[in-house]
Amino acid sequence: MAVLKSSPAFLVLAFAFAFFLCFIMSTGSYVYFQFVQQWPPTNCRVRIKRPCSNPRPLQIFTIHGLWPSNYSNPTMPSNCIGSQFNETKLSPKLRNKLKRSWPNVESGNDTELWEHEWNKHGTCAEQTLNQMQYFQRSHGMWYPHSITEILKNASIVPSPNQTWTYSDIVSPIKKAIRRTPLLRCKPVPALPKSQRGPKSQRAQPNSRPQSQLLHEVVYCYDYDALKLIDCNRTAGCWNNVDIKFPP
Ligand SMILES: *[C@@H]1O[C@H](CO)[C@@H](O)[C@H](O)[C@H]1NC(C)=O
Ligand SMILES: *[C@@H]1O[C@H](CO)[C@@H](O)[C@H](O)[C@H]1NC(C)=O
Ligand SMILES: *[C@@H]1O[C@H](CO)[C@@H](O)[C@H](O)[C@H]1NC(C)=O
Ligand SMILES: *[C@@H]1O[C@H](CO)[C@@H](O)[C@H](O)[C@H]1NC(C)=O
Ligand SMILES: *[C@@H]1O[C@H](CO)[C@@H](O)[C@H](O)[C@H]1NC(C)=O
Ligand SMILES: *[C@@H]1O[C@H](CO)[C@@H](O)[C@H](O)[C@H]1NC(C)=O
């Protein structure tokens, strides 16, 4: 080994291996896309420590991100080697569209969210979609299939009290897009200390919550981000727990 370490052959091998690793990381490895849309009132309900910049969040589903994904890898590829976000690569016209479809409902700084999503997720599919295409394609996915309208047509509208089952919400979406989407939920946040009841009546952390808030709807797309496909991951909501769709 000592001989090998200093030999040119070893150096060549080491370089080749490092190059190979870089290649794998830089090309990313994904199989399909998850297009994730979020319900802003839920984003803001669960942010207790740093409230949303706008106290009256939008009442439409907006884009969270377009995530290259891999069935056999539950943690998606992320932060791949590639070009970093550069806002000037987005035309002013596209930026105006994204301000509607892809706002940062938490901090109010839209560019910050676009930068985060591109650097974390977009870079992992740069071989398929460059920066301009990544944002254009995402806006195009948001625009024709308005979840807000699909749900409204099925009489599923935001309400502080009413609850739904998972399939109540999935069925009309599935019917409209003719593919199976996924829902993601958040537990109803604990009340501030001053408003809590006795400890014995409170849910334990990590236990099944009594009810949950609809947070995100995921559509799945093929490798080229052109064709909708069925999502077949397990849902991100608790089974058999009522779902609220808060205003
Ligand atoms: C998906 O992820 C697994 C586990 O990380 C990896 O072995 C596999 O190569 C990936 N699939 C593709 C198509 O990149
Ligand atoms: C950002 O993109 C513009 C237009 O393509 C280019 O002129 C500029 O050099 C880029 N900036 C950086 C920091 O890469
Ligand atoms: C918004 O975020 C961008 C990207 O992170 C940053 O460059 C910019 O300074 C931020 N703008 C404000 C007003 O904070
Ligand atoms: C909702 O219903 C209206 C009126 O029936 C219809 O024009 C529209 O296409 C429907 N939208 C969706 C997304 O199903
Ligand atoms: C929701 O429930 C509370 C308590 O049960 C009730 O006081 C309130 O009127 C209800 N609100 C709506 C919009 O139904
Ligand atoms: C999901 O579908 C893909 C493509 O049809 C398949 O390769 C994969 O095994 C499926 N995963 C699960 C968990 O069913």
Image: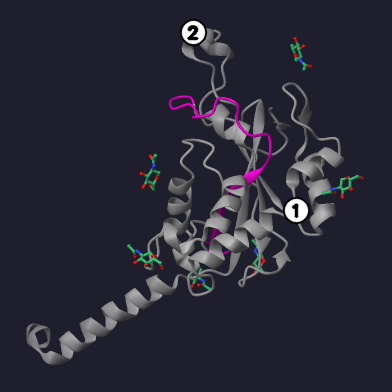
In the foreground, 130 or 217: 130
What residue type is disc 2 on? Answer: Ser
- Residue 7 in the image: above or below residue 34: below
Taking the spot 52% from the left edge, 61% from the top edge, the residue there is 91
In the foreground, 202 or 155: 155
Left or right for 157, reference 81 = right
How far across and down, in percent of the image, does residue 82 sit?
38, 68
Give the overall secondary structure of the magenta segment: loop
Q: Secondary structure at mark 1?
A: loop
How far across and down, in percent of the image, does residue 15 sit?
22, 82
Question: Can residue 221 be spotted in the picture?
Answer: yes
Residue on which disc 1 sits: 145
- Residue 139 in the image: above or below residue 244: below
Which of the two labelled residues, at mark 2 and mark 1, occupies the earlier sequence position? 1
Q: Secondary structure at mark 2?
A: helix
What residue type is disc 1 on? Answer: His
How far across and down, in percent of the image, does residue 136 sit?
59, 62
> Is the C-beta of the residue carrying label 1 under 8 Å from the nearest atom of ligand 4?
yes
Q: How is the image coloured?
A: one colour
Please check the rendered image and state whether residue 104 is part of the magenta-colored stretch, yes or no: no
Q: Please give the range of residues in magenta.
A: 48-72
Measured Cα–Cα span from mark 2 to mark 1? 42 Å
In the foreground, 2 or 121: 121
Question: Can residue 69 be spotted in the picture?
Answer: no
Taking the spot 64% from the left edge, 38% from the top edge, the residue there is 39
Q: Which disc number belongs to residue 194?
A: 2
Image quadrant, ligand 5: top right
In front: label 2 or label 1: 1
Residue 69 position by quadrant:
bottom right
